Amino acid sequence: MNNVINEQRFPKELDDWKKKSNTLWYLGDLRLLDKPKVSVIGTRGVSQQGVTRTKNITKILIDNGFVVVSGMAKGVDTVAHKAALEMNGSTIAVMGTPINKCYPRENESLKKEIAK
């Protein structure tokens, strides 16, 4: 586990958040925060059509140099992360749990893959 205390390293998108805390926990490559980022989020109960659309959107983003940012929830979030990794793109998972835990549990291997 790593942490960032230096306020200059906080992404400007988190300006409001850093006023509440001076620590940002992370796993993986912190340099991804300096690249263009786009959030891909959606329903947990994604349809097959939604899976296809999420993969297509993710491909466009990766092909255009964006880092995909999403939660670790079931559904669209999981599809976006997996698609980004399959396309040799970069992805950031925003965790809703402590960094040493994973929810949903079945995304534990996905969390480790993203951290690599």
Image (cartoon, helix red, strand yellow):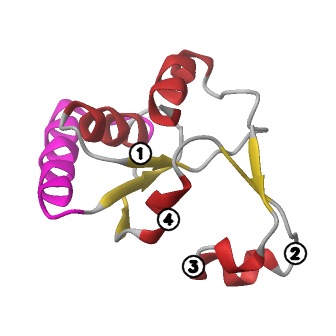
Question: Considering the numbered disc 4 on the image, is that residue within a helix, a strand or a loop?
Answer: helix
Spot occupied by residue 80 in the image (x, y as percentages of width and height): 32, 42
| Location of residue 5 with respect to 94 vertically, above or below | below
Answer whether residue 32 is magenta in the image: no
Label 4, label 2: how far apart the Cα atoms are: 19 Å
Q: Are marks 4 and 2 in contact (CB under 8 Å)?
A: no
Q: Nearer the viewer, mark 2 or mark 1?
A: 2
- Packing grade of label 2 (10 A; few <14, some 14-19, many >=20) is few
Residue topped by disc 3: 13
Residue topped by disc 4: 33
Residue topped by disc 2: 20
Instruction: Give the residue displayed 57% in from the left and 20% down from the top.
Output: 108
Of the residues shown, which amino acid type is indicated by label 4?
A: Leu
- Of mark 4 and mark 1, the one earlier in the sequence is 4
User: Which stretch did the figure color magenta?
Assistant: 43-65
Spot occupied by residue 51 in the image (x, y as percentages of width and height): 22, 36
Assign the N terminus to one quadrant of the image: top right
- Of mark 4 and mark 2, the one earlier in the sequence is 2
